[in-house]
Image (cartoon, rainbow, N blue to C red):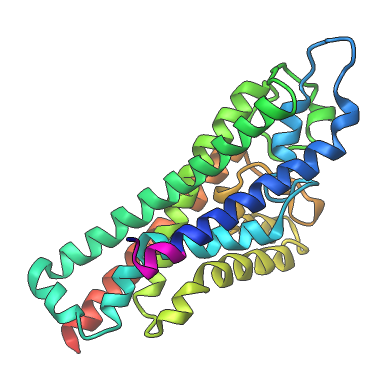
Amino acid sequence: MLSRTKKFVLIILIIYLLLITWQFVTAAKDGAGLIPANGKAVDISVMLFFSIQPNGWNENIISLVMMLAFVPTFGTGLIIYFKNNNMFGAVQQRIGYHGFIKAGIIRSFIIGVVFSLITNLYQLALINLFYYPFFFKTRPIKLYIGARPGYFSTNQLIDLCSYVILSAIGWGIFAVLIFSIGLFVSKNSIYLVLGPCVGLGLTLLSFIISLGNEFLLFLSYLWFPFAVLAPGQFALGSRLPPINSYLLFVLVALLYLLLAAYLIKLWQQKRKLG
């Protein structure tokens, strides 16, 4: 028999997959008129995939918020629960602070990567099986930039593969950042919504600051979470990223990892002193 916690997790995952499926059904219905009747190979499946990603014209805000919440929770919710309860002393004695932190980082990153890969691969399978088989080509920049303002390549196969791989890594890094912030959170209920609060808060801040000059635009992209969660999908304030999306991904990822490392070190020092 499944425990209550496992049943809850299973129900949440089913709801999430149903939302992803419904998003695809809605997008496929809207794009049904684009399917060629003469059998000509076209790239509509690639465009449909990017349309259901964050900031695509068929994005689903509810499933995005759920993912922001569940990736950190599924990865390290139990670890944070131990920290916030009387069980932490026993855990600390058994594995030590180093083992505790190491487990949190590894679990956060792996769950983030796996969750993102499952989501994107499931979407790709739905599109390929129930909408139109994937066909890749090189698109003119003027046509492609409307769908992918920060595209990695106008070669759609390279662009799609780069997006899926880097997005998965980005979700892993974001989950590690949320774990490092969660170390300072004493309420388990707050940790459940920490991902959406941090993700959407940083996004709002980035949009506001991007309204300034070119230097402020560059700064706004440096901490913009979707530069790693959905690389290439956004143009803040309709202004393109000032640097190549590969380089932007690396810079934001490094910034998040450095911030996470600083917060973890700070928490360890605080625990030892107090």
Question: Is residue 267 magenta-colored?
Answer: no
Residue nearer the viewer, 13 or 112: 13
**Is 8 displayed left or right of 218 in the figure?**
left
Would you identify the image quadrant in which residue 199 lies?
bottom right
Residue nearer the viewer, 217 or 132: 132
**Is 199 displayed left or right of 187 in the figure?**
right
| Main secondary structure of the magenta stretch | helix
Residue at image position (63%, 55%) is 221
Count of numbered tags = 0
Question: Is residue 6 magenta-colored?
Answer: yes
Would you identify the image quadrant in which residue 5 lies?
bottom left
Inspect this view and state whether residue 241 appears: no
Would you identify the image quadrant in which residue 90 lies?
bottom left
Residue at image position (48%, 43%) is 168
Inspect this view and state whether residue 218 appears: yes
**Is 90 displayed left or right of 70 in the figure?**
left
Residue nearer the viewer, 118 or 239: 118
**Is 114 displayed left or right of 214 in the figure?**
left
Q: Residue 143, position in %: x, y?
A: 84, 28
Residue nearer the viewer, 241 or 85: 85
Q: Residue 26, position in %: x, y?
A: 79, 45
Q: Does residue 143 sit above or below 267 in this rendering?
A: above
Residue at the far bottom: name it: 274
Q: Does residue 117 sit above or below 19 in this rendering?
A: above
Magenta stretch, residue numbers: 2-8
Residue at image position (11%, 66%) is 95
Quadrant containing the N terminus in the rendered view = bottom left
Q: Residue 74, position in %: x, y?
A: 41, 61
